[in-house]
Image (spheres, helix red, strand yellow):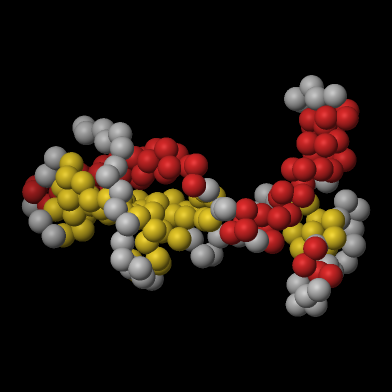
Amino acid sequence: MSNIQSFNWEQPGRSYRSNGSYVQKYANVKVEEFDCRIEVVTDYDHDWTMFRGKFTDTWEEGALKNPRGRYDNRVYKYFVPDSTVRETINDYTTNLKYSIQAARVQAKTQVEEDMKLAIDPGSMGYTAVGVRATISFKGVELGDASVWGIEIDDSDAPYIDEVANEELQEALTEARQKLAELREN
């Protein structure tokens, strides 16, 4: 079994699309007898509030005012974090052994950053992507694998390589099985 460690990523043309999604970068590699394509694709359907909280017009305990709510009546007025500042302080002091003062500062910062990411991840340098691996043999697609909802910034290139390797191995396993079945028949 081949184990690819890193990829020679290429940047597509300005508006390259694959299966309806915009490709940020891609790599073509040959593994054994297979042609493999790995794509990092923009995930426009990603839910940035997942595991962070929810937006609402009704104030609840622990809610933060949405800064955009002051000047834009088309957005919700409040953000209710999944973990309030008080709960996060407790977590920092109990589990991570922070002092109460350090825990307050860190908890407030974390909850506010969660809200900012939920409001506008791009302004914080984040984007959500999917990594898709497609395997073909003599022009026939035999395997594919993908994972979606990966939140990244520019420093996450090594992580993307790791995820790409995992998806490549999963797609190769499927392709090997299908090719073996075809050769038996």
Residue 136, position as x, y percentages in the image: 18, 54
Q: Quadrant of residue 118?
A: bottom right
Give the residue drawn at x 85%, y 60%: 65
Residue that protrudes farthest toward the top in the picture? 97
Above or below residue 85? Residue 122 is below
Above or below residue 72? Residue 112 is above
Residue in front for this viewpoint, 75 or 2: 75
Give the residue drawn at x 21%, y 32%: 1
Above or below residue 160? Residue 73 is below
Residue in front for this viewpoint, 67 or 148: 67
Residue that protrudes farthest toward the bottom in the picture? 73
Give the residue drawn at x 31%, y 66%: 13
Give the residue drawn at x 8%, y 48%: 183
Would residue 54 be found to the left or right of residue 151 on screen? right
Residue in front for this viewpoint, 105 or 54: 105
Residue 76, position as x, y percentages in the image: 79, 69
Would residue 126 be found to the left or right of residue 101 on screen? left
Would residue 182 be found to the left or right of residue 128 on screen? left
Residue 42, position as x, y percentages in the image: 45, 60
Residue 129, position as x, y percentages in the image: 47, 55
